[in-house]
Image: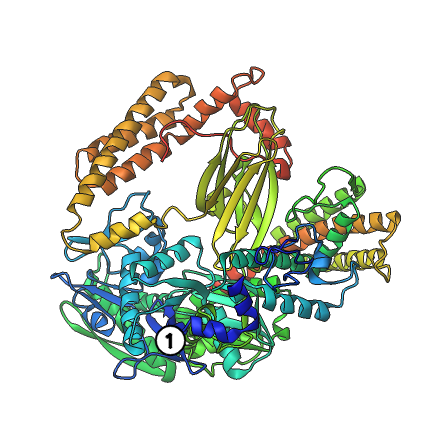
Amino acid sequence: MAEALFQISEPGASRVKHACRTRAVGIDLGTTNSLVAIVDGGRPICLTDDRDDALIPSVVHYAADGTVVVGAGARDLASQFPHDTIASVKRFMGRGPRDAEATRRLTPYLFAPAGPNEGMVRFSVTSGTRAVTPLEVSAEILKALRARAETALGGPLAGAVITVPAYFDDGQRQATRDAGRLAGIEVLRLLNEPTAAALAYGLDKQAEGTFAVFDLGGGTFDVSILKLDDGVFEVKSTGGDSALGGDDFDRAIAHAIIGRLGLGGEIDPRTVRRVLDAARALKEKLTTEGEAAIEIALADRTATIGLTRAEMDALVAPVLARCESAVRRALKDAGLDAAALSGVILVGGATRMPLVRQFVEKLFGKPPLADIDPDQVVALGAAVQADILAGGAGQGDVLLLDVVPLSLGLETMGGVVEKIIHRNTTVPCGATQTFTTYADKQTGFELQVLQGERELVADCRPLAKFSLRGIPPMPAGMARLEVTFTVDADGILRVKAREEITGQEAAIDVKPSYGLTDDEVERMLLDSFAHADEDVKARLLAEQRVEAQGIASAARLAMADAPELLTDADRVAIEAALAALARVEVGNDHHAIRAAVEEVDHASKEFAGRRMNRAIGSGLRGKDVAAVEAKADETASKRDLATRAGSHAGHSH
Amino acid sequence: MICWSCEREGGGGPFCGICQALLPPNDGADHFAVLGLPRRYDLDFSAAETAYQGLSRQLHPDRFATADPRARRASLGQTVQLNEAWRTLKDPVRRAEYLLELAGVEVASDDQKPGPGGERGTRKVAVPPAFLLEILEMHDDLGNAQRAGDAVKVAFLTEEMRGRADEAMKTIAAALDTGSTQAPDQGRLDEAARALIALRYYRRFLDEADAHEDARRTGRGVADG
């Protein structure tokens, strides 16, 4: 009672209680540069180094002797040690090895083989003696920011608000949160970058009305429509592309440079790094000048590349054009015309380019606003929100109302996604839908939670799976499964499922498969101490071998038991997966074994499902299961589509 | 509701009438009651928005970030309820659907959960088959015009559909707006329900046309660049 009372009637009391409130900081963890800001005397300011520079380049260098260099020092080492110096790591956050494929053509990095279970790219550094995940690289940057803040504050941090692109999906958000944890930072909130920018802008300029925030950073593009009204910042809609940014301009320019230099085939990583650096330097020069030239040191010669702004604009225009449909959709979702906007706020270093400003002006029909340094505005807004969350009284009546960036739903029969919470719904929010069984005597539901706008499961991002069992056998359509999605103010999704007749319940806090458990964070911390992890590895290896033997024998037994349910394609895939497992099982890489186990599980899934369906539906009027499923597909209305039946055979995690 | 904090009867508001602690939401409250608005179709948008913002300021979890866990939970529940109420009422179509749902007329849409009470005691309203056939034909016409690259025809069809959607919106407003909080009679409810279903088809048509137009424009934008 007492505490709640103080919150409302005596703000002074909470001030005493939370004396360390100013120790909460805002962090902009950017693709190219990162910053940290605090609220000091009621105003947000960015913390700078001794040369008065607020930006820390988001570059991490892993030296052969095990030391880690972050920032400008690392950037200077990039062209000399292209494999060991990771830049633009944000693009890889929460991304699996396959996602990275697209950018692999023109990056200087080496990638360590990673299993599907890991779901994370790993960079191979220091001549392959060390593999680091994007999460660990980001944690190094965060540690540098934390050190800067703690020096300025003269003591430990109470917590931080870290910004993420509004269009980051759950996996990317979770990876960012985990990176914070790994850096020893309590993450108070992940805040969307355009929202942070609007917060800083609105407070500083006392702006009122409806604004668009056009945020083109190094690696991501976001657009948000917000209404600023008497201290309430309400996000109306948000959209974007989490893989589009200034980096892509660099890449487009670099491709042209490579063409002009006549470089073909395999290009060595050092040259790639130099060409990318040259492209970026040219782009920056051409922001203020009509033409520019730069020297590039190649293996055998030094070449000079000259470029005019018009030539560059022609190279980057196709990339920039990709922003247009996201802007249109955000306006449509907000129910607005561009003409109804009070203004357009520019955020992100790439918005310094004259071409980008012209593009924005044409798209919105008004000149954009860029009064606050587009590099700093996001960190400043994050500091304001950190101050609010830590109970600071400095921001008076300010309140942020943010939205869910991507729709959330469940897999239903036929691989279709039923959306439960729609994109651009204000958080916190919740919704309930009722599902039913599609098979007679179905005793369980397996629920797959998905994120994305597309209709088919295959086109959305899987977030989590869980199951509800112990439902008594009933005819199809009788069981009533009530599924409730809740997204809290931190954007964390909780899913609860309840069968109405039996009252069976199951619930999970959704963490994507590549989000880390506390154990895993601990293990990563362990891993970071050289040689301290041998025991851990040995244990993991032993566990994985047991797992491997279990699944291999289960799969062989199942294949012998029901050969008639096995298609040729299944048999080939399962045999191949088993062979791969047998190969790595004798090795010492537990990651590889785990990956191979996952592969077997994946390859045998459909077969196992068929076996289980047969076991469940053996009383089904003598029809085969495939036919029954097909019929259910045709006739069931969308709302009545049930989630997939029961468990599948084989091992469970 | 018995207050979790002072353990006395705290009254019906979001805050305990005695100790001012934030109480969990009243699940039985309808969306109009949550926002303190009269239960009617006609809405003073800016007054309603002001009410929403005011309640958000009082109830939002950010206000309780450092409070007692029970107050934080109450804040989450209250704000989820508030946001759902405002999401439903601020949009004229969802508002109309909700009023019909309250009146026991079923027009559940894709993005709406079945109403409380479910199938029992509701009346289903349908549109005539001839209407569906006509819509199908217009879809065909649109598809043909798009494939043929006939921009004039596409624009014409889209414009006609937009006109129909506007008409349906007017029909809904006229049928539901009784000028008071008194519920419309059966006939007006059915009229509104039919217009709502028709509107859903019109919107699907327009979304499809939009998506096609967007794809076309983006494709050209890239090629031009």
Name the residue beneath numbered marker 1: A37
Picture layout, residue A461 above or below residue A302: above
Q: Chain of mark 1?
A: A
Q: Which three-letter amino acid code belongs to the residue tagged 1?
A: Ala
Residue A256 picture quarter: bottom left
Residue A297 picture quarter: bottom left
Colour style of the rendered protein structure: rainbow
- Could you tell me which secondary element the residue under label 1 belongs to? strand
Q: Nearer the viewer, residue A336 or B130?
A: A336
Count of numbered circles on the image: 1
Residue B70, percent from left and from top: 53, 56
Residue A232 visible in image: yes
Residue at image location 51% in from the left, 55% down from the top = A406
Residue A540, percent from left and from top: 23, 40
Residue A590, percent from left and from top: 22, 40
Left or right: where does residue A462 sit relative to residue A141? right
Residue A144, percent from left and from top: 27, 69
Residue at image location 59% in from the left, 61% down from the top = B22
10 Å crowding of disc 1: few (<14), some (14-19), many (20+): many
Residue A404 visible in image: no
Residue at image location 59% in from the left, 68% down from the top = B57
Left or right: where does residue A198 sit relative to residue A265? right
Residue at image location 33% in from the left, 71% down from the top = A34
Say which quadrant the C terminus of chain A sits in: top left
